[in-house]
Structures are given as C-alpha cells and as structure tokens.
Image: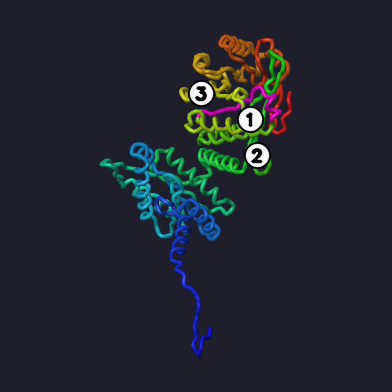
Amino acid sequence: MRGEGDDRFLYGSIIDITERKQSNLSLEYMATHDSLTGVYNRRFFETTLKNRLAEHAATPVVILYLDLDRFKIINDTCGHKAGDALIKEISQLLDKSLPDNATLSRLGGDEFGVIVEHCDEETAYRHAVNILNAVRDFRFMWENRIFNLGVSIGLAICDDSALTPEQYLSMADAACYFAKEQGRNQVHCYSKHNAGMQRYQYELDWVTTINQALEEERFLLYYQPLRPLSRQNDGHYYEILLRLQQKDGNIIEPTAFLPTAERFEMNVKIDKWVISSTFAYLSANPEHLAQLKKCSINLNCHSLADRDFKLYVLNAFEQYRIPFEKICFEVIESVAIIKMDDTIDFMRAFNELGCTFALDDFGSGFSSYSYLKSLPVSQVKIDGSFIKDMLIDPIDAAMVASIKEVARAMGMLTVGEFVENEATMVELGKMGIDFAQGFGVKPPAPLKEFVPL
C-alpha cells in the first residue's frame, strides 16, 4: 500500500511453519512405514501391490512372502527386547539383499513381504535364494549368546488379471507355509495344481472371511431347544448355535469355518462374541430371561486356557446382569481333556458363582468314564452317534443306557443329541434320559425369532 509521499509499504506477518511441516512429514512417514524397523508397513505393501498390478498388466509382478524360522525361540528365551533388536537387524539385512526394483515391507511380527517389478519367475527365484543365503549366514548376538536363523519364502507370480491383490498375497502365504512344512529355510513357488496348497489357501480364505464377519457383525445367533423328558416343560431350555452370513446372504453352518478358526486360534474371539451377543439379547428381553431355565453356550479349549477370557466372561455377566444359574457352558469331551487343568480351574470358578457345565459329545472318547469323574460337570450330552441308530442297533441302545446309569449315579442330568424322530424321543424317555435335542424336537432357528416349545 502507498504511504506518505511515494514510499510503498507491505504489511503482513511471518509465521514459522517448519514445525508444522515436520509434523506433517512425520505423520506421512508413520502412515507408510513400520515404526520398529523403518521399512514400509503392511498398509503400504497392499496399496503398492494394488497399484503395481494395475500399472503393469502386461508385465508380471512377483511377490515374496518371508517368514523367519526359529524367531520364536529367541523371542521366548531372550525376551521381546531381543526380538525387537533382531527384527531391526534382519530388516536391514533384507533391504541390502534386494535389487532396486524390489519393495520390502514388514507385514507383522516376523513376516515380511517383497514386491519385485518387471521380473520373471527365474529371476525372482534367484532373488529369493540370495535372501535365503544372507539370512543363513547371519548371526544374531545377544548377551554373549549367538543365534543362527533361517527363513521360509513363498513365491507367487501375479500374472492373472482376474485375481485380486488379496488372492495373490494369500497364494504367496500358502507357498511360504509349504516351504515351512517341507523342512523350513527354503523357497517354494506357488502352484495351483498342488492339492495340499489349495487346501491351505482355502483355509486362509476362511480366516479372512471370519475376520470380516466379526468386523461387520455378520455372525448370527441360532438356538435349538432341549425338550424335558422326565418332567413337565417349565420354561426355556436351549443351546446357542452359531451361523455366518456371507455377503450374498447365504447362511453358513459352523462345520465349514470353526475348524479353521480353531487351527488359527481365532475361536477365543468367536466365543467372546457369542457370549456378549447372547447376554445382550437376554438383557434386552427381560420377559424371555424370566422364563429362561437354562441357556447353553459352547466353549473351546483355547478360550478355557486364555488368561483374559475368564475376566471377559465375568465382566459380561456384570454388564448385562445375567443370573449365573441360567447359563450352562458346554465343553466337548475331547476338548476338555486337552487342557485338563485349565478346564477344571475355569469350571470350578464359575461353578462357585452358580453356572453349570455340560460335557458334550460324551462317549466318543476312549476313557470317558474316568474323565467324567474328574470334571465338575452337572450334565452329560450323549454323543449323537449312539442316539441316531439306537432303535435298530442294540449295542448303541446299551451304550446309551450305560451312560445314563453312570450319570445318574453321579447325580448328573443326561441329554440325548441327534434325536431325529418321535420314536427315538419316546424310547429315550422310557430309558430315563432327562432331555432330548435334535431335529425331532425342533431344528435350529434364529434366536431373534425365538418361539417357545
């Protein structure tokens, strides 16, 4: 602006934005890099892979999936501080072992991913072998101790435009798994013709589906009633069952996904969801809760052995104000004996509060009666394999009668599972079985559509 005379002046203010710029740069760095090692993170890896596949449709992109061998031994024996130091050193080693057209990312824990552009399978394999040799020759020192390591590497060529980045990563992971299965410290190339690898990739797909279902609330609670046979029906007795609703609306039964959940130890999350969701339903339906005599919920051995699970269940009882005596936890006989001490500790803790426990699929084990004496259960669910043919197989009928007599002598109630028809239900009642459960009583149905017997 013009001042007195012909002099010109410029008015304004000067603000030092150096700190803000540095802060923005720091945030951008943290969004794309692993905080421990300084290499790229999983998010950047997945974004880069997606972009590279779109850009190089005509040129193959290769993925290497790396999983360190024997890392857990060092982490467990020397502590997490040593584990962190090792991961840092290995990251630097890997970075130096890769060509300029490769992108290294830490995918999590001791797993790394590499994207190699403009590369054929033979060249990518040589890069993988270079990594293998570098890690093999590496020595990690911690407190006067020396450790050697190995690495298992899965290789997948991204040359099919019909596949997604997630599918390619799953393929590389499956190949890495097979490298470990075949003796570790080697490279394995993904092959769609390998039946075992396809089976493992199928399981990995289920892992993704389960995680998404938990995040998107696509698990559903079903129930199946138990009909009293030795008394008049005085309220609601039922078992909580689980279903998974796929994005297309199809309902999937647990036999399809629970084995994978157990193998990858995801069932603790699932058990927590079932408990909190069941308790939330009961709390929101006080008239139903008042009529409820016993609601049975299945638990897995990983949940029983999980340190935080007991506290989680206690908090759920308190949060939703569910009477302890209305809940029965079911444990499969074969599962209970895997973690015997943990199972007994859990049972005793909740028995004292008023919960009851049932031993599911009883009779399928070889030492059922001896375990029955050790476990503080109040209900025995007779394995359905004895129930379904008991009208035509005298041995099955004798087994059912035998289990009933032992359970009665120990003051336990009995439930006949897989009751498919009225005739079987009548026979179980004559034998003195306390409850019947199966399609002959009522098929499973959504809990939110509950209809009393």
Give the magenta part as a residue range.
Answer: 286-301
In the picture, the disc for residue 241 is: 1
Residue 245, numbered circle: 2
**Mark-to-mark CA distance, 3 and 1:** 24 Å
Q: Is residue 438 visible?
A: no
* Residue 184 shows up from this direction: yes
Q: Could you say where residue 417 lies in the image, as x and y percent from the top left?
A: 64, 20
Where is the C terminus found, in terms of image quarters? top right
Q: Which of 336/22 is in front? A: 22
Q: Amino acid at mark 2?
A: Gln
Inspect the image, locate mark 1, and give the three-letter code of the amino acid beneath it. Answer: Leu
Q: Is residue 40 above or below residue 363?
A: below
| Amino acid at dot 3 | Ala
Query: Tag 3, which secondary structure?
Result: helix
Foreground pick, 69 / 61: 69
* Sooner in the amino-acid sequence: mark 3 or mark 1: 1
Kindly identify which numbered label has been placed on residue 349. Answer: 3
Reading the chain from its start, which is encountered first: label 3 or label 2? 2
- Residue at image coords 61%, 26%: 323
> Is residue 346 shown above or below 41?
above
Q: Residues within 10 Å of mark 1 (few under 14, many from 20)?
A: many
Alpha-carbon span between mark 1 and mark 2: 13 Å
Residue extending farthest front: 4
Q: Position of residue 380 (x, y in %)?
A: 59, 17
